[in-house]
Image (cartoon, coloured by chain):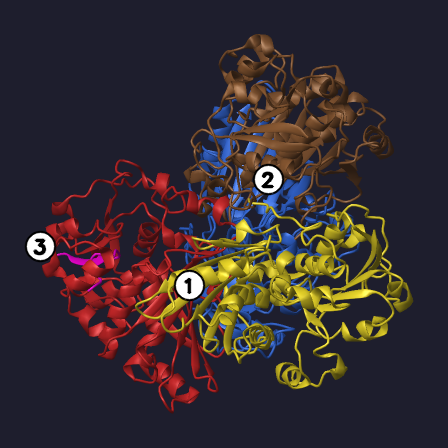
Chain colours: A yellow, B red, C blue, D brown
């Protein structure tokens, strides 16, 4: 059994990591790390989990370094310090945060308006979408698991961009997310009274997942990509649906587009192409992604739909999937392939 | 008091019409018409309304012709026959359905895949967005109130297209709607078990509001418009948010765009331009529309957000607003200007 | 027009008061008072309201004393000080808080675990359920509007206790409330992530509305009442449904029970007895209360259902209804009698 | 591997059975039976499940008789005929319906207003609450899995009644359920427009789970029980919370009550007694039940709270738990012990 420490265990993604590791045939929880929640029992922050007597403790680099695997599920900017303390001491690390997703100091500074505190690290972490970067992940001891929105968008667009059947420029990603993606913090914008029975866009033209999408699409396509990204908050707990508008390259047919996706994901246990627009409830609870393609040939507009569970394929599930590859396990080990509907 | 008949009173829009007319200073309900609900008391179909003893009756052209005003709130295709029986007999008609919204038999046939049963009527009905077609409405005895999605999109785009500050071509309208827009019929897709905690797109590339948007934008802009439209269903009762992607014309600045909207709606009591992305809960319960503009000048992409209550500004409220103009009343008479949040 | 100041305008009940006063034929807003929100525009705290440029200001006793009517919509314990500063200076006061609802210092101390800071006031405020205490309200310059749960329970039980057709002892009030009843504060328990898709009981055996129910039932019945009260939070914005278990007195029939309620509310515009269990959506948006009676004669158990909108009949609507009586206006002035479904 | 047929696979409980059996270490799906859905692929009725190509077929007694285990997940009254065709042919049967839950023809006729079509069967089926009737279940080839409401109520009350620390008479069970408990049929009352943002009681004093509760409590307590039961529908997909009012017997203390439950469930992996009122989100997704006890000693009123996932511990999960006992497997095999929050 791989001894596993979960840093940031009190959050929503952290809770899902505990659940997945508890049920994993080859992993076991060796430590639960919190900061504000240090000293609490697991039952106080995650009453839905068993083993509620387990204690959350403060981060301790030595203890983590003894583990085979460390998941970091921390807010933006908080992963760098613990990662630096752990690297090279034997543990493999999967970071669910955004600290190591971008590949150059310049891109990082442009996206975050500040220099990265450890710029040498950028570009040394594998980008953790197993369906597109399996070799990188399997051969690395450090993986930056992607954001939930980029996962949904890049899974749909990646093969098409790589095969040059759509233009990498002028892409529009219009996404809706359940509220768990925003985390568990106290904010007026996350109150039931604010969220229920309403929808809104947020961080218009300034969401940090936009440069991440461009970076990932450039990595798979080998040429610059430009993405306009608009995230929306919708009144549900889980699930992301991205509706994507792209321009097919000259002469591309619907069959070409379908073939591109089908070929890319022929061996992928978690990605399915549907003939109908996916509903998020079809994937919630599983590590699956559902993608559909719709072509308006007359107008030269391609529409892609991509649905995932933001806490599983968009966070904890994908992180475990990466770890499976890093340790040579079956890619599907410990991961749910069937959802919860209703 | 204007005697008013509501045909299709048992539906959601019909119920809102009853509520608005009951509270209107210059209108009173003279008749409630249903078909499947004929013979029922109002309290059986709308327990939220007062005067629950009022009886729903079958459509009777003579009775309607005696009224000053007839609202038709019927499913697609069902308005034509009653309208033909009423026209020219003295009542003014506001149709909330889609039968008379398009302006030519050719466009109708393309949109609906069938010939219009009364093609001579097409083009003789005013298109009922008071903010853009006030004179047409005020001088007509027949008004086709627009669909909920077109209302949200055309209010945002109309002035910009008319002022040629955005291109009328290549428009993308990506909309989210609460479930009441789909009506009250029994369908698996409208069950709580299907809708709650999930989002989906539907009628991708084939929704009938798409040609209506093109028609309306051509009417205000004087040149052909092309729109790609994707409607989504989100788990809430009311509200539409349209996120619109457009290309500004050369040299257009954010100030130009804002000025175009501000000028167009300077005297409009129900349309507000916000500096932040609107949330649907800010307009639900009122006849208001909230619009925001976001420009990515570097990439040449303009994003518009437009929020309305689909049953009020998108249906019953706008229908009453049209009727107010048709009878020379204050445009705001009987219409709520303040919403319900939470 | 009665000049009206709303103290606590930034909360949910405060927002509804602004909306009701804005639409009232005989009242107008003379001032909006906030504390944390002082200095903000109304549009910043209530984007759903018109007149968004109106400024919220700090409480000023002189300014309030100039008004005809002052609504206090403040957290528990915060009404006493401003009320003391205003009493006897000419304004009439309706307090939506809990400071003056109990009638004796002893009962207050038992309920709140502390002495009342102005014990002389207790018993001098009318208890503001207009259907049961109309004369008290109409002849008072100070009214304590009841809590939302007590309103729902006392409207159903009051006449039956007064007519001695049910026992005043051993009453069980089991209530469900939408989240707006808990107010707008930042708390883990009010996050969408916590509330959505879940139900729970809270403050079991220690909710402060329990002694208020006993006090009110004693006032109408003239004998001690004992109530066990369990409030539950359910995932919706508005609405309270109380399911009440009582013991009918010997020989009481269903007809007796129905007659008791019907007689009590024959002249009440807002209370209806239904033959079927009420749904909260039938009253949300209106000032109405819907009540049903169900008798299990074999087992000697009576079940009452009572539904209201907690922000209207349970708070702002009832406060305006009280003010209407205090100023000799029509009881229904400015109050919605039709709800919003859906 | 135990070959397993699921009859009624297209419903919500049926879908959960497929998911549980697919993930079970000792069971495998040998057949999926539907009626209206016969001929469809699994992906058409349960897009959330894998193996979507599996075909639903009409019921065939011979095929079922070849299986080791048959789950019947059918509407009320529909289980009797297939059960009669299967009994004695070698398969073990777990019926999730209500046909065989009551123990005598008289009780059945009183509850359902009709004679049972196979009265000899009544009393020969084990009642499937493993925590209370383990031996019956383990030694039977036919088990009637209990209803969702009775499961929640009887788990909380059973030990207390058996230990005579509460009276078996005058019990009040006030329950709230998510909508999935009502199944997947098309009905106005199950539309999102009807259910969302509203609560209601239904089948007041006439719900068929009431006699089932009395029967089960008599079986554990050895004396007649009387229950008043009120079910409520709340706007969520899953979860039941029962709030139960009972009278402690003379001299009973809170410690006595807690000890009674703790002793009864000391070896039960799925039942936990909490010190705080449970929230349904803490159990949704797992086979767990959470119970709390609250005593108002002064008034002699005991309140119990009991929360389960109606589709798991209240249906499919408990059915699998029963099957585990019937085949001598670990009671927890294939059953989730950790929930999904959020």
Q: Which residue lies furthest to the bottom in this view?
A: B251
Nearer the observer, D325 or A158: A158
Q: Residues within 10 Å of mark 2 (few under 14, many from 20)?
A: some
Identify the mark at residue A256; answer none if there is no mark: 1
Task: Specify start and end residues of the magenta stretch as a single range.
Answer: B88-102
B64 relative to B35, above or below:
below
Image mark count: 3
Dots 2, 1 in contact, CB < 8 A: no
On the picture, is C2 further left or further right than B84? right
Residue lying at 77% horizontally and 75% vertically, measured from the top left: A80
- Taking the magenta stretch, the answer to whether it contains residue B96 is yes
Q: Where is residue D276 in the image (x, y as percent from the top left)?
A: 77, 45
**Mark 2 and mark 1 on one chain:** no
Q: Mark 2 points at which residue?
A: C220
Residue B47 sits inside the magenta stretch: no
Image coords of residue A5 (percent x, y): 82, 59
Task: Read off the residue under disc 3.
Answer: B89
Percent coordinates x, y for residue B192 in the rendering: 48, 45
Could you classify mark 1 by the number of other residues whose Cα lies within 10 Å: few (under 14), some (14-19), or many (20 or more)?
some
Comparing marks 2 and 1, which lies closer to the viewer?
1
- Give left or right: position of A182 versus C19: right
């Amino acid at each position: 059994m791989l001894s596993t420490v979960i840093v940031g265990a009190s959050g929503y993604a952290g809770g899902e990591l505990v659940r997945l590791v508890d049920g994993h045939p080859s992993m076991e929880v060796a430590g639960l790390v919190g900061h504000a929640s240090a000293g609490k029992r697991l039952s106080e922050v995650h009453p839905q989990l068993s083993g509620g007597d387990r204690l959350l403790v403060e981060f301790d680099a030595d203890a983590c370094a003894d583990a085979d695997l460390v998941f970091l599920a921390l807010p933006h900017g908080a992963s760098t310090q613990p990662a630096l303390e752990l690297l090279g001491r034997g543990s493999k690390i999967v970071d669910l945060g955004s600290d190591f997703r971008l590949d150059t100091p310049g891109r990082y500074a442009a996206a975050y308006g500040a220099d990265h505190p450890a710029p040498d690290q950028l570009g040394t972490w594998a980008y953790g979408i197993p369906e597109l970067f399996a070799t990188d992940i399997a051969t690395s001891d450090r993986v930056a698991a992607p954001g939930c929105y980029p996962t949904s968008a890049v899974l749909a667009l990646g093969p098409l961009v790589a095969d040059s059947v759509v233009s990498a420029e002028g892409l529009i990603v219009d996404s809706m997310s359940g509220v768990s993606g925003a985390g568990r913090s106290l904010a007026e914008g996350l109150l039931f009274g604010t969220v229920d029975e309403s929808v809104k866009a947020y961080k218009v033209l300034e969401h940090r997942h936009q440069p991440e999408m461009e970076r990932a699409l450039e990595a798979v396509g080998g040429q610059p990509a430009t993405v306009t990204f608009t995230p929306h908050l919708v009144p549900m707990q889980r699930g992301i649906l991205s509706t994507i508008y792209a321009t097919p390259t000259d002469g591309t047919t619907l069959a070409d587009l379908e073939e591109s996706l089908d070929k890319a994901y022929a061996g992928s246990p978690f990605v399915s192409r549907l003939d109908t627009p996916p509903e998020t409830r079809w994937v919630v609870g599983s590590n699956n992604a559902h993608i559909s393609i719709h072509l308006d040939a007359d107008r030269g507009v391609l529409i892609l739909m991509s649905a995932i569970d933001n806490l599983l394929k968009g966070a904890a599930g994908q992180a475990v999937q990466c770890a499976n590859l890093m340790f040579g396990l079956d890619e599907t080990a410990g991961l749910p392939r069937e959802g919860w509907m209703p």
